[in-house]
Image: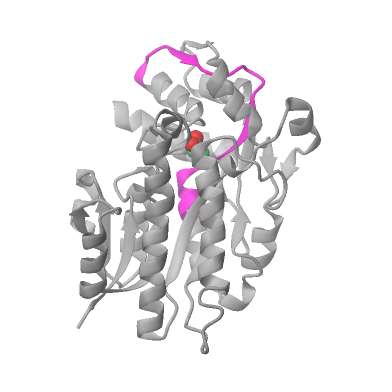
Amino acid sequence: MRKKAILITGAAGEIGHALIEALSKNGKTPLLTLDLEPLPEDVRGLTTHWEADILDQKLLDRLVSEYEFDAIYHLAALLSTRGEFSPGITHQVNVNGTMGLLRLAAEQSEWRQKPVQFIFPSSIAVYGLPDLETKTQYARVREWEWNYPRTMYGANKLYCELLGIYFSEYYRQLAAEQPVMVDFRAVRFPGLISAFTIPSGGTSDYGPEMLHAAAKGEPYACFVRPDVRIPFMAMPDAIKALLNLAAAPAEAICQRVYNVTSFSLSAEEFKGWVLKFFPDAEITHAPDLKRQAIVDSWAADMDDSAARRDWGWQPDYDAQRAFEEYLVPNITKRYQ
Ligand code: SER
């Protein structure tokens, strides 16, 4: 007998940490987590963890033979800044890694005659606005607008959304009998901010880096101009979005890829919130023109009305509540 489980890849990353806590609290199905790295100590007891590479075909074969997955949260990815330094390996991890897991999900869906749910965090990085004038004009982009990513990571996320749709709607479309398909669902996240982890390798990282530096009493030079604007979201809302999307009844889901967002801030406004709580913080701007150009190509805000309409998406944290009730108290405790 194969053991039932929920699989989380990239589990040692920022989202993984919070998702393990939430899923182990909520559900009865045991968790199996994968990452190249060990898990942070505080979540180790909550899951069976394999330190393994999702590109290892033998590993995927072993997973299929030992487990039956109700759901796969596929979080493993190399982010937008890191991806530009090694586009080849980034493509392998982000695309081939996703393809391997989608095939695994397809095989299991057929075998057990019930869809495996495949939950995929996509990103604001799938958007690519050509210039600041257009960014101002299309202030709240809808899912199908400006899908012209400029980074390897953004291109990979956009393509993997399409792969997910393919495996859910068209896989083996010429076969005599249609197989049971994967149930792929994706959210496009804005820049995420966690009180407990610092992101690495992303291009929205200036927000969380500014805040964590202030809490540590360290000076911070922000790598984008003060007027650069993108949306952000506090980590508890990101987890809420993943869990609510997973819980939505299939008939409510009218599309497989949804924008979700909470609040949009310029770097200047972000700094204002940080200074409100850490008035002595030393924050300057030293734009890195190349990383800044990536953020400039991302939307200033995202239209998440489809998610609100179809599965009742609503963030719990606006900027005020995110800083006041989640970020500042937890970060302060962390560095005490
Ligand atoms: N936070 C990500 C990055 O900066 C965007 O999804 O790459």
The quarter of the picture where the N terminus appears is bottom left
Vertical comparison of 317 with 165: above or below = above
Q: Answer yes or no: is residue 174 visible.
A: yes
Q: Nearer the viewer, residue 147 or 172?
A: 172
User: Residue placed at 56% from the left, 50% from the top?
Assistant: 158
Residue 187 picture location, percent across and down: 55, 55
In this view, which residue lies farthest toward the right? 137
- Whether the magenta-drawn stretch holds residue 237 is answered as yes
User: Residue placed at 42% from the left, 59% from the top?
Assistant: 99
User: Residue placed at 50% from the left, 38% from the top?
Assistant: 152
Left or right? Give the position of 191 relative to 135.
left
Vertical comparison of 18 with 30: above or below = above
Q: Nearer the viewer, residue 28 or 76?
A: 76
Q: Answer yes or no: is residue 316 visible.
A: no
Vertical comparison of 77 with 73: above or below = above
User: Residue placed at 35% from the left, 62% from the top?
Assistant: 23
Q: What's the magenta region?
A: 216-240
Q: How is the image coloured?
A: one colour
